Image (cartoon, helix red, strand yellow):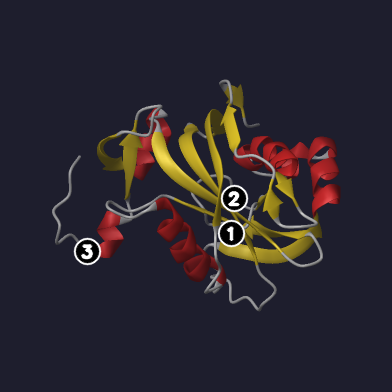
Amino acid sequence: MVIMKDSPLNSRRDLVILVDEDDRELGLADKLIVHRQGLLHRAVSVFLFNASGEILMQRRARSKYHSPDLLSNSCCTHPLEGEYTAEAGVRRLQEELGVAKVALQSAGHAIYRLELGNGMIEHELDHLFTGFYDGAFDPDPYEVSEVVWQDFNKVHKDIVMHPESYTAWFRILLPAVFEAVDISTGSLREPVSLRHAVSSGK
């Protein structure tokens, strides 16, 4: 599916960018169709940390069409047509959390195909970003029901003990980010390059 350049923003946000495994664009498609058919598409995941080495977690709103009421990383999104991935991350931080002026650092990428239940499949080439923030929040209740700072090491352990409390993609991304980021200095040890096999998100 292709949209016209003058399409309303809300209509554009219902479309995601289909890609191949080298992130070459193949076209646009409706996000619900994409998630039902498990088509590979471009995504962005942001992980925010504070000066205490804590990770910012959000609980997805119960109204979300997949993975509702689960804990996840700071924010996720799908870039709009013509939008750089870092720009998409900055935009979504503002929209979901009311967080502005955060410098994001590329932390690599991941490809995964996860069955989410209810006929939904998350098949993404996900661009990962980290950032540091110590300010206030103004979350959108239609997107986020809770925002909380958590000790990074404790989350890393809890996700093993209670995987059902977290989104499927966060469960596979967090260990990779844990290995890649030095929280004490904020530096990236090495970019994430993760390819996850087909699995169940249940």
* x 34%, y 33%: residue: 19
Q: Are marks 1 and 2 in contact (CB under 8 Å)?
A: yes
**Circle 1: residue type:** Ala
Q: Is residue 29 left or right of residue 192?
A: left
Of helix, strand and loop, which one carries label 3? Answer: loop
In x, y percent, where is residue 85? 42, 51
Q: Nearer the viewer, residue 50 or 99?
A: 50
Of helix, strand and loop, which one carries label 2? Answer: loop
In x, y percent, where is residue 21? 41, 27
Q: Nearer the viewer, mark 3 or mark 2?
A: 3
* x 66%, y 57%: residue: 59
Instruction: Indicate which disc, 1 or 2, sits on the residue closer to the N terminus.
Output: 1
In x, y percent, where is residue 78? 41, 49
- Give the Cα separation between the discs numbered 3 and 2: 27 Å
Q: Which residue is mark 1?
A: 61
Instruction: Indicate which disc, 3 or 2, sits on the residue closer to the N terminus.
Output: 3
* x 80%, y 57%: residue: 184
**Circle 3: residue type:** Pro
Of helix, strand and loop, which one carries label 1? Answer: loop
Instruction: Indicate which disc, 1 or 3, sits on the residue closer to the N terminus.
Output: 3
**Rendered-image quadrant of the N terminus:** top left
**Rendered-image quadrant of the C terminus:** top right
Q: Which residue is mark 2?
A: 68
Quarter occupied by residue 60: bottom right
Q: Which residue is mark 3?
A: 8
Residue 142 in view? no
